[in-house]
Image: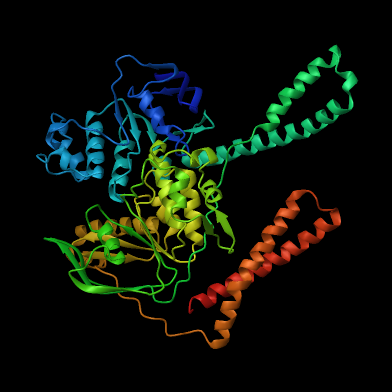
Amino acid sequence: MAVSFLQIEGLTKSFGDLVLFEKISLGINEGDRIGLIAKNGTGKSTLLSIIAGEEGKDEGSIVWKNDLKTDYLPQDPKFPDGVTVGDVCKEKGPELVRILTKLRITDMDQPVAQLSGGQRKRLALAHVLLDDPQFLILDEPTNHLDLEMVEWLEDYLNHRRMTLLMVTHDRYFLDRVCNRIVELDNRNLYTYKGNYAYYLEKRQERLNAQAAAVDHANNLLRKELDWMRRQPQARGHKSRSRIEAFYELEQRAKARHDQQQMRLSMRSSYIGSKIFNAHGVYKAFGDRVILKDFHYEFARYEKLGIAGPNGTGKSTFLKLLLGLDQPDKGHIDVGETVRFGYYSQDGLQFDESKKVIDIVRDIADYVILSDGTKMAATAFLQQFLFSPEKQYSYVYKLSGGEKRRLYLCTILMRSPNFLVLDEPTNDLDILTLNVLEQYLQDFGGCVIVVSHDRYFMDKVVDHLFVFHGNGEIQDYPGNYTDYREWRELKEAESREAEKNGPAAGAQTNRPTAQKPKTEKARKLSFKERQEFESLEKELPRLEREKAELEAQMSSGSLSPDALQKAGIRMTALIEEIDGKEMRWLELSEFA
């Protein structure tokens, strides 16, 4: 029989007029590994803090099993003044050195006040893991971990008997560690017994069922409304129950799932054929070499992911490219048409006393979309899930994830053609990540992204730079999962080779650096150039026609004949767009 560790009943929390959740209930048993999912600003971290006893509730009850050993990793850990790393982790048993080494915490005498935010988060993570609690609450445990650390943490948690309740936006982590997903949506909780992949499937079934129920209620409502209007004399005692049922039906018909979608369709500015060329770049900090005789020619529309352990120079590489830091030797030539959009790991420091709408209007009163139309700043913010009420809130009232979303908004609205994203996935909710991924896949420019989010990297990048340290950079032609499988295969071959002698192992050494790409010899002819430019004008026009046709067909206003003609035109239009897009891609290789 399952042992109950925690029982939550009727929990409510609000801040002024903002109700985060209302009368929610949740039971957690021994062995549950729960991932909590919700949009930014809807109360995930607040709920964890209340359960951990760090924050008060408005009403409801939280009942723990007696003598249960628990621990809590907050999103932003705090430590007492004057303590060292050793003070935090003292008397933690034989696993101390193994865990600290994996999290790259080595100086036990270092004052905690001297640690970076990421180092403090990793120290706090080490502390709660070393406590070996029966029930562990984790708020964004993968933030500030590199890819190797995330994979180690996955393995560590999967081999412990801890019961877990966590918030994380790392979807592979959710899929591999959790056996239950709990979604906080519209102030309610929805529970799914399975991993992240199972949750996606069952959540869609729930939304489809809700949509069907709303459609059914609307159909009934139309009939009842007609009856209410046509039968005023029938509103006597005998029909009272039917009138009351009508008003209940009206409430059901008004129910709508709040499933706003961001449509990131901002126009990127023109980018020429020259992006950037690196010539013999060398960069070091003391004995720590970041780049060593680095040569590379970046191609048009290239989407590059950067991976590797913390401290190997990933962020430094980005700063050298952007001109925020200078190489010790060599140089980087950036094309004249390149307009960088830089999403820094540190984020933008907003004026907290300003309103959200003012932050955007300080940049522009409107933005230009991919089809050339203009969108007002307030409408643009709504695409980023900032409701009209939220737009007139002060920045200091935003959650960490909402501030990150606003920061992303300020970058994309400037129409860059080369996005440089340093850990963009930290603190963004899964809905925002989904739309950002789609935007980057369709982005008509160049992308370089540093991220510990393997799911995000797999969906966005074409190839990887893997920083191994000491200036060693491997150019891998594939996404992160491809690279991980290749690495595991090579490690297995290396172990086998060690058994059979050193000669066999000589073939398994990984490449030490990428070779520069050579320029394409073929160029577009004059006729092909004209065709390419014509396609760039035709495709947006065809897409607009397709969108208008879709709107007409779904409006319900077309006659049967008109609907049939529209369907025939839609089929032809899709085929025409597909053909022209394929031709555009062929020509763009040499443009």
Count of numbered labels shown in the rendering:
0
Front residue of this view, candidates 531 and 173 = 531
Front residue of this view, candidates 10 and 409 = 409
Give the side of residue 337 with respect to residue 98, left or right.
right
Residue 478 x/y as whole percent: 40, 63
Q: Is 294 rendered above or below residue 168? A: below
Instruction: Report which quarter residue 320 is drawn in.
Output: bottom left
Q: How is the image coloured?
A: rainbow
Give the side of residue 92 with respect to residue 559, left or right.
left
Q: Residue at x 46, y 66 (%)?
A: 445
Q: Residue farthest to the top?
A: 237
Residue 69 x/y as whole percent: 28, 21
Give the side of residue 273 with respect to residue 367, left or right.
left
Q: Residue at x 81, y 53 (%)?
A: 558
Query: Is residue 509 among the parts visible in the rendering?
Result: no
Front residue of this view, candidates 256 and 509 = 256
Q: Is 449 rendered above or below residue 49? A: below
Residue 173 x/y as whole percent: 38, 43
Q: Residue at x 79, y 20 (%)?
A: 243
Q: Is 270 rendered above or below residue 79? A: below
Query: Is residue 215 among the parts visible in the rendering?
Result: yes
Q: Residue farthest to the left?
A: 109
- Position of the N terminus, as image quadrant, is top left
Residue 107 x/y as whole percent: 12, 43
